[in-house]
Image (spheres, rainbow, N blue to C red):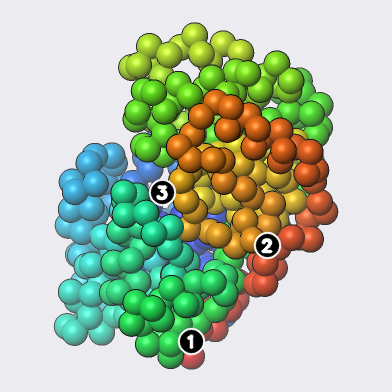
Amino acid sequence: MKVLVVAGARPNFMKVAPVLQALERAGHERVFVHTGQHYDASMSDAFFDDLGLPVPDRHLGVGSGSHASQTARVMEAFEPVVEETRPDWVVVVGDVNSTLACALVASKLRRSHGCRIAHVEAGLRSNDWDMPEEVNRVVTDRLSHLLLTPSRDAEPNLVREGIDPSRIVFVGNVMIDSLLRILPRARALDMPGRLGVTEGKYVLSTLHRPSNVDDRQQLAVILTALGELSRELPILLPLHPRTRDRVHGFGLESMLEPLRTMDPLGYTEMLGLQSHATVVLTDSGGIQEETTVLGIPCVTLRESTERPVTVTEGTNRLAPWPLTTDGILATARSAALQGTVPVGERAPEGWDGRAGERIVAALSRS
């Protein structure tokens, strides 16, 4: 079996690493394609090093751009790769533009080249069509032949949309495979000590979604809340390049002064900080999942989440919407009082470090 595995953006790397490793252990031929959707070394190369990912067989180097231009460039660059390699499966993960673009190409070549599409993390829904990722998720699932779900609540979403249940396979959360493998190394780094803060006595925050950082008023509300919270605990804020650009473009630099800002961190460093935080404030989808397994309280700064299982079974909660400074502060303080729980205690079914194996088994059977 020849399997072409696609990654394009930072959230993809933690998901494809266990799949690539499981394919190798099972003796299948694998082709690893990096579209280059995230091209900044601090946002991409560090993750390759941390996760032990192989050098990509193809690097498409598409870079940044609007949703339309980026999707188009990925499609143009990916089509010749499929024509040349002729895989049995094209495996796409998550919900970024590369995911949709490569699924579109593979669907067009299905009849002539025989390749089928498997979507890892199928069935997640925020029901917020203002999120570009929601469009990517729904369309990719519609195009896919095998829908590999990370949690039990995903299958009903797909069935409601008319997907044949025989094409849906529950495999669990593959990103947690990477987390559990790397966690001991991450904790050994002593990231709190390196940054001069005390374990369990700081807040970690990340911001990158356009709905939060591209709107000056929204960004100011969040930064004001973080500034207020910094009077109680140190705030660590690794700055996504997009967020840093918007802060400067909006003239909000002074609002960063109470915060401990830094450049983006590698996966292992970031995991080490998450695992010792009092509470995490984020708009990231992946961090909602990671904190649930780590047992760290999480406040999600979004109107909705495509990962509701992190709220119903995990340690995550949504800040009141629309966001206000008082709402963020109240939710963060309540989450901090909740306290931490042992690693894995709140982990949903299948978030056990073996999802990569189940994905490869599902590909082999189908």
Residue at image mark 3: 9
The quadrant in which residue 24 appears is bottom right
What's the distance in space between the residues labelled 3 and 1, CA to CA? Answer: 26 Å
Mark 2, secondary structure of its residue? loop
Residue at image mark 2: 313
Q: What kind of residue is marked 3?
A: Ala
Task: Please tell me how crowded label 2 is: few (under 14), some (14-19), or many (20+) other residues with Cα within 10 Å.
Answer: some
Q: Nearer the viewer, residue 108 or 147?
A: 147
Task: Please tell me how crowded label 3 is: few (under 14), some (14-19), or many (20+) other residues with Cα within 10 Å.
Answer: many
Residue at image mark 1: 364
Mark 1, secondary structure of its residue? helix
* Residue in the image at 53% along x and 15% along y: 256
Q: Which mark is residue 188?
A: none
Q: Earlier in the sequence, mark 3 or mark 1?
A: 3
Q: Nearer the viewer, residue 258 or 100?
A: 258
Closer to the observer: label 1 or label 2?
Answer: 2
Q: Earlier in the sequence, mark 2 or mark 3?
A: 3
* Residue in the image at 43% along x and 58% along y: 126
What's the distance in space between the residues labelled 2 and 3, CA to CA? Answer: 27 Å
Q: Quadrant of the image for the N terminus?
A: bottom left
Is residue 335 visible in the rendered image? The answer is yes
| Residue 25 in the image, given as x and y percentages of width and height | 59, 75
Mark 3, secondary structure of its residue? loop
Q: Quadrant of the image for the C terminus?
A: bottom left
| Residue 105 in the image, given as x and y percentages of width and height | 22, 67
Closer to the observer: label 2 or label 3?
Answer: 2
The quadrant in which residue 38 appears is top left
* Residue in the image at 36% along x and 82% along y: 163
Q: Nearer the viewer, residue 172 or 114?
A: 172
